[in-house]
């Protein structure tokens, strides 16, 4: 074995429970040949070995983002981005300002991001209000959650079919155009994908990009790399062209990170097609750093829109009976779990509310009994915003993984959920203590979906938010959030928990633990050298920590982060 590089005198956090700390690393090609003490590493040096003095700097394994949307983000480059606000008058003024700054000649379709659902209350936004602000062209304002939008009348008319019914595509296989008490469409639409605005595009003769290319995607990928991210799971692989793009980037040596794709399943009726897609893509697009072995299922919707499944009736239901809905309940989930187990395909589940979470846990328990010793797949719950403590414990005992977006911890969004869940239940969200206390594997992610919020894909931003429950970009409001921006106070995470979740836990869930996720001899040399000692930095200053440079496949790289982002 030829030793090409030796890095000495570092404060190296390995994410390896057997040896949490080291001071030296030896690299042979792409591989870690040794991780341990200085003297042993020095003794491995050969005539041509490059010796690098870390001068006491802190080293971490490369981070893995467990759920994000690189192509979804890339395809938003044409959208108008405006600052976020909870003030309705300010929101309307911003829309007017940005419509004037982006005239019809430049933006024939005024697709603008974003608004908070809670600004308009349970009745949602109205087309007439948007008509006054943007009267000269079709307009769509995207809900912050990316699960709803607001059309003006011109856009709504262009979407109607010969029967006068608006039509739009959705990743779930359906869209809901909301009507008022008179049966008129209000302009508010739930679960409408932007790719589904065909009627608008045809009417104005303008079309957004159907697929993201290397140029559109590169700024985001460079942003990830600049902040120490060396791997990701795509929470929503947008078609075969997206999977092919990552494969071709990797084959050309341009990707520079691990990428795991997902095949989307909306309902149980879509399962066989999703399995066929996953198997087809796996055969055609597996490379050294690119793979796919996962079916993504949307179990329910969102707390903010009330299209989730709750264990308790919604607080805004006068009859006290409405607990919402799910796209799949226990019986269908059992069918999906056992069928995917036959194919050896893992599952990544969009789960929002405690009713959906219980259905998943119940289904997982039954499926494991049915399969017995033949059980071999991983089941991950993404988001899992509101969960019952008993079910968190059961999920851990059943070997379920949970993926959580750290930057949500500080109150970034979600107040509209109070309309449905009430403040007491809302104050129990985002708490996984029973899960981790019982050995559950908690991993972390960004779940960003547009260039508007891409700054939040920085893992150090997420670490600070999860450690403090305070969002670095939002003003403190002690009257609304006593003690911390987001309750419960006890759900803050330690630095060690967060580092483990961003490294070895995510690697394990993506079946990459034999290659990456920790610094151990035999694994790939993917790590970052920090500008500060993260273990000496206060929780509220974690955003000041960053990757000074990284090593990927044993090669040093310094990535320029030139991504321009509207902070909002």
Image (cartoon, rainbow, N blue to C red):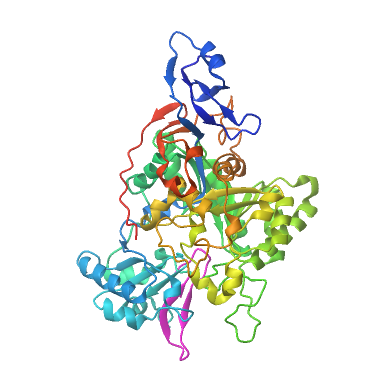
Looking at the image, can residue 349 be seen? no
Q: Residue at x 60, y 43 (%)?
A: 505
Query: Is residue 20 magenta-colored?
Result: no
Q: Residue at x 53, y 46 (%)?
A: 281
Splitting the image into 4 quarters, where does residue 154 fall? Answer: bottom left
Q: Is residue 422 left or right of residue 4?
A: right
Q: Is residue 1 left or right of residue 310?
A: left
- Residue 22 pos. (x, y %): 56, 26
In the image, farthest residue toward the bottom? 182
Looking at the image, can residue 82 be seen? yes
Splitting the image into 4 quarters, where does residue 506 fall? Answer: top right
- Residue 347 pos. (x, y %): 62, 52
Choose between 64 and 328: the one closer to the eye.
Answer: 64
- Residue 366 pos. (x, y %): 77, 58
Vertical side of 55 occupied by 104: above or below = below
Choose between 279 and 548: the one closer to the eye.
Answer: 548
Splitting the image into 4 quarters, where does residue 77 fall? Answer: bottom left
Magenta region, residue range: 167-190
């Amino acid at each position: 074995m030829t030793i090409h590089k030796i890095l000495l005198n570092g404060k190296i956090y390995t994410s390896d429970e057997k040896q949490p700390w080291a001071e030296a690393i030896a690299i042979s090609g792409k591989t870690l040949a040794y991780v341990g003490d200085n003297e042993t590493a020095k003794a491995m040096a050969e005539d041509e070995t490059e010796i690098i003095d870390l001068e006491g700097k802190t080293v971490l394994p490369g981070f893995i983002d467990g759920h994000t949307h690189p192509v979804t983000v890339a395809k938003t480059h044409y959208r108008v981005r405006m600052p976020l606000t909870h003030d309705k008058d300010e929101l309307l003024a911003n829309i007017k300002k940005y419509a004037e700054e982006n005239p019809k000649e430049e933006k024939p379709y005024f697709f603008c991001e974003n608004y908070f659902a809670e600004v308009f209350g349970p009745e949602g936004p109205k087309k007439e209000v948007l008509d006054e602000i943007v009267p000269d062209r079709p307009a769509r304002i995207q809900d912050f959650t990316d699960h709803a939008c607001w059309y003006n009348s011109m856009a709504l008319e262009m979407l109607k079919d010969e029967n006068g019914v608006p039509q739009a595509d959705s990743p779930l296989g359906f869209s809901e155009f909301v009507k008022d008490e008179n049966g008129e469409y209000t302009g508010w639409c739930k679960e409408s994908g932007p790719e589904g605005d065909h009627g608008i595009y045809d009417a104005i003769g303008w079309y957004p990009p159907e697929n993201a290319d290397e140029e559109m995607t590169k700024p985001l990928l460079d942003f990830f790399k600049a902040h120490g991210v060396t791997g990701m799971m795509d929470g929503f692989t947008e078609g075969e062209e997206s999977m092919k793009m990552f494969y071709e980037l990797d084959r050309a040596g341009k990707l520079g990170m691990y990428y795991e794709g997902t095949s989307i399943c909306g309902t149980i009726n879509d399962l066989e097609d999703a399995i066929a897609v996953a198997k087809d893509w796996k055969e055609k697009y597996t490379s050294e750093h690119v793979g796919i072995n996962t079916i993504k299922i949307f179990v329910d919707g969102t707390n903010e829109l009330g299209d989730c499944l709750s264990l308790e009736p919604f607080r805004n239901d006068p009859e006290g009976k409405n607990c919402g809905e799910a796209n799949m309940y226990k019986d269908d989930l059992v069918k999906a779990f056992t069928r995917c187990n036959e194919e050896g395909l893992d599952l990544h589940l969009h789960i929002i509310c405690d009713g959906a979470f219980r259905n998943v846990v119940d289904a997982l328990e039954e499926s494991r009994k049915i399969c017995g010793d033949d059980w071999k797949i991983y089941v991950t719950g993404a988001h899992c915003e509101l969960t019952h403590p008993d079910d968190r414990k059961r999920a851990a005992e059943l070997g379920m993984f949970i993926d959580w977006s750290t930057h949500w911890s500080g109150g970034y969004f979600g107040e509209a959920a109070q309309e449905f869940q009430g403040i007491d239940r809302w104050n129990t969200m985002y708490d996984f203590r029973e899960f981790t206390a019982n050995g559950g594997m908690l991993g972390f992610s960004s779940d960003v979906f547009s260039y508007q919020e891409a700054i939040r894909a920085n893992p150090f931003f997420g670490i600070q938010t999860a450690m403090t429950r305070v969002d670095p970009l939002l003003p403190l409001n002690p009257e609304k959030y006593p003690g911390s921006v987001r309750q419960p106070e006890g759900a803050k995470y330690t630095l060690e928990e967060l580092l483990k979740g961003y490294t070895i836990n995510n690697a394990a869930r993506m079946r990459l633990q034999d290659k990456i996720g920790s610094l151990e001899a035999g694994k790939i040399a993917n790590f970052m050298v920090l500008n500060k000692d993260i273990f000496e930095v206060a929780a509220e200053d974690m955003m000041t920590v960053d990757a000074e440079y990284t090593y990927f496949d044993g090669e040093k790289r310094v990535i320029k982060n030139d991504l321009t982002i509207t902070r909002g």
